[in-house]
Amino acid sequence: GGYLMEQREAVIVGGGPAGLAAAVELHKKGVRDIVILEREKQLGGILRQCIHDGFGLTRFGEALSGPEYAQRFIKEVEGRGIPYFTGMTVIDITRNKVVTAVSKDDLMQWRAKTVILAMGCRERTRGALGIPGERPAGIFTAGTAQAYMNLYNRMPAKEAIILGSGDIGMIMARRLTLEGAHVKAVFEIQPYPSGLPRNISQCLDDYGIPLYLNHTVTEIHGNSRLTGVTVSEVDPRMKPISGTEKRYACDTLILSVGLIPENELTAGAGAELDGRTKGAVV
């Protein structure tokens, strides 16, 4: 068939806050020929599950929740008539900017003058940590636990331990506490916390949740469901110090151990990656 590839001034990969903001900015600058491609069913990205407030202070001068903040952008994109596809996963970007995407019933291609990569991050998982032990239920990344609670109304924990002091983990310490779970402690392997001071004070201190630095989980207990973890202090080289082990009973371990750029497409398109950040070289 005479398949004609659509030409676009700009194809934006990702309909989260970054992709939406990029689209609006381009449109303000007079670029009309844009399309946003988003693999989830809705625009808004991770903001849809961030129901705490604190968004929008700099941009709108008021405190909004994540979904409200996302909605401001979505309204602006729709008000400007910027076309977007949801449920559309980009599988390939060539070096000469041909973008291939698939949906449930379609495969589409665009040739772009400019491709904007706004795929965001994914969470580091337990696999990236290599904690020995069984693989019981009850081990979640902080973002997965957040999705269970805020998007699907499911309670993932009664007695929780949080590994890592990333912002999402601290926000989940508060969220779990507010919903009636008991968060025993947050353990951080580094000598300093990785999240914002604001979150330490508002999510941990305000709820009496202790934060232990220079500590990590060294063993996982339980067969079908987690029954507890062993935590050890670590030396300056981050190696566990024997004799410091302490066992905590818990049914849930939440990992808040950092984010990794979603960069397969970036690498595939031939962009140079930064060895330190693992994202594109800026």
Image: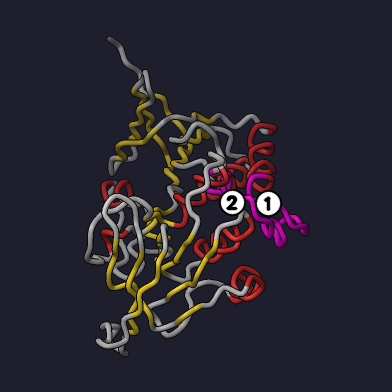
Mark 2 residue element: loop
Quadrant of the image for the N terminus?
top left
Counting residues from the N terminus, which is met first, the one under dot 2 or under dot 1? Answer: 2
The residue where tag 2 is placed is 50
Q: Amino acid at mark 2?
A: Cys
Say above or below: 143 vs 28: below
> 77 left or right of 13?
right
Q: Which residue is at a point 35% across and 74% down the rendered structure image? A: 247
> Where is residue 52 shown, x and y percent of the image?
65, 55
The magenta segment is 45-67
Circles 2 and 1: CB atoms closer than 8 Å? yes
Say above or below: 228 vs 120: below
> 132 left or right of 186?
left
> 20 left or right of 237?
right
Say above or below: 124 vs 105: below
> Where is residue 175 shown, x and y percent of the image?
59, 57
Let me know if residue 59 is in the magenta part: yes
The residue where tag 1 is placed is 65
CA neighbours of label 2 inside 10 A, class few (<14), some (14 to 19), many (20+): many
Residue 180 falls in image quadrant: bottom right
Q: Which residue is at a point 62% across and 76% down the rendered structure image? A: 205
The way the protein has been coloured in the rendering is secondary structure
